[in-house]
Image: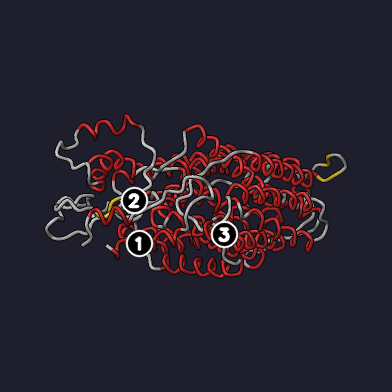
Amino acid sequence: MATAQEADDKCTVDIPSVPVTECLPSMAHASSATTWSQPSVWLADIVWPAIRPLQSKRLSLPSTNRRKTQNILNVACALDGADMQLLPSTFRALERELHLGPKDLGQLSLCQSLFQSLSAPVWGFLADRYSRQTVLAYGCILWGVFTIVLAASTRFWEMMSLRALNGMALASVGPLSQSMIADLFSVDERGRAFGWVQASQNTGAILGGVATTTISQMIILGMSGWRVGFIVVGLLSIALGVIISLTSMSIPRHGSAAADEQSGTGRRSAVVRGMARELRKIRNMARKPSFWGVVLQGVFGNVPWNAMAFFTLWYQYVGLQDYQAALAWAAKQAGAGVGGLIGGKIGDSLHSWNGNHGRPLTAQISVLLGMPMTAIVLQVIPRSPDWYIAFLACMFLLGMVASWASVATNRPILSDIVEPADRATIFAWLLAIEGASGSLFGAPSVAFMAEMFFGYEISDLAVKDMTEETRLHNVNALANSLTVAMLLPWAVCFLIYGSLHFTYRHDRLSPNQQSGFPQGGLFKEKQTPMNRGPDDDEEDGPSPVSRHGIVEIASFRSGIAEGGSDDGDALRERDRGVAEGA
């Protein structure tokens, strides 16, 4: 057992800045018998009581800086939503102008979603090593350029290639914004923060979807309206990238791999170590059953949302005008935006009620409410323009009740079980798996079933010029395909969320680890049966002071400036070395 003085000589403690007023109450309770000549005992008796309440909270930016950063991320997510809605909003225009059938449109959707999913881990890898602000700015500019070039395409293979490149650039938004949100907000605030991200994304999807669908079959400045929509979104994306690059965004990074880039070693060696680190991250997460639960949920849960890309086309075949079909889709997006905020709040409340079961229960409630609403929209409401108001109301309710899982369960649980230094990469891998599954089995499965099993007929005529038999045949084919592609995956998701009731409690990190501190907090004690009290909470780490007055301090460094923090793995190795040396 090392003495207190040896522990002091061996360890360095960087104490976060704490206002003097917060320390005074703790100092007032300090024992008059404190031995001031022993630094470790002084730290334990005076400083530790003052900063322990702060340890469970995020060492966040000032509120103004945090608000500015969140607003920029929300704008990026809004443009992300608008861009993702460009293709579904122009399905009918592309069918008429380029003679593309549902399978061709499904392949375009598959191409973008698949490349977006496969590229997400690359962006996560970059985000863990370089300034996330710079990486996000480059991503926005690239996706804007590809979107503008896409507006000039006239052949299917051109669109396929450009949609792939656009998806690769678009993949930068997901892992970067979600890892930043996880670092900016504490555990009990993340549900609402992710809710605002989803609300922003859905707002962008509403504006982009309504505007693009409305003008898609018009002629504007001698161009097809859908091309104008692509150009406008592309220009906005480039402008956002420039704004991000010129704005000061100080985001806390709690352990990262950025230190490897400054270690003075060769570039090839850094790349090899980086690849090895990524494999270790995945291997470590694969040992947690809750991670597999979230992943499997993503495999099935993203399929219905991807399949909904055909809703606009279905409403056009129902007989709604283009702007009415766009508003019906927008009602679902608006509901999802409101539902993200409601679901985030409900998830946080149920998590406070029961930390082990609240979040899985929130997701199960959302699934149970979403399935009957899907059946009502597609199979119960008469397929006639006369029922337009009913479609609007039910689409809003569908979006509002079916959108809780991502913000209230999936992202917060992943934030709770993943080390802060690994969040960007793990979020990226989750997005890759979810996106790949949705792109493979979502819209393509609807197109395949509609044409192969339900007899969908391709037509370049306007809906009003079609025979009633052809129109009704296509309406029924799309409705039945959408019903199968949405209800079956959601039923599987309900069962998967049930498994989290048994695994989440064992996989959660302690509050110290979630805040970027080493396990056990600022002070680490070797517990023995003599000094372990009946009220000691193993999750929160041991008490800072042993019965014998000997304190062993685990060194840590809290990286506040972006890109200026230690490597997560090196930090943990150093902590283990200190503990073993003691």
- The label nearer to you, 1 versus 2, is 2
Q: Residue at x 61, y 69 (%)?
A: 268
Q: Indicate the amino acid at tag 3.
A: Glu
The picture places residue 98, in percent across and down from the top left corner, at 81, 57
Return the residue found at the far left. 530
Q: Quadrant of residue 155?
A: bottom right
Q: Which residue is mark 3?
A: 261
Q: Which mark is residue 512?
A: 2
Q: Which residue is mark 1?
A: 499
| 473 or 22, nearer to the observer | 22
The picture places residue 216, in percent across and down from the top left corner, at 76, 45
Specify few, some or many for label 1: CA neighbours under 10 Å numbering under 14, 14-19, or 20 or more: some
Return the residue found at the far right. 222
| 9 or 140, nearer to the observer | 9
In the shown orientation, is residue 172 left or right of residue 347?
right
Q: Residue at x 64, y 65 (%)?
A: 448
Q: Residue at x 74, y 50 (%)?
A: 147
Q: Indicate the amino acid at tag 1.
A: Ser
Q: In 3D space, how far apart are the residues under numbered discs 3 and 2 (Cα atoms)?
A: 27 Å
Q: In 3D space, how far apart are the residues under numbered discs 1 and 2 (Cα atoms)?
A: 26 Å
What is the secondary structure assignment of the residue under circle 1?
helix
What is the secondary structure assignment of the residue under circle 2?
helix
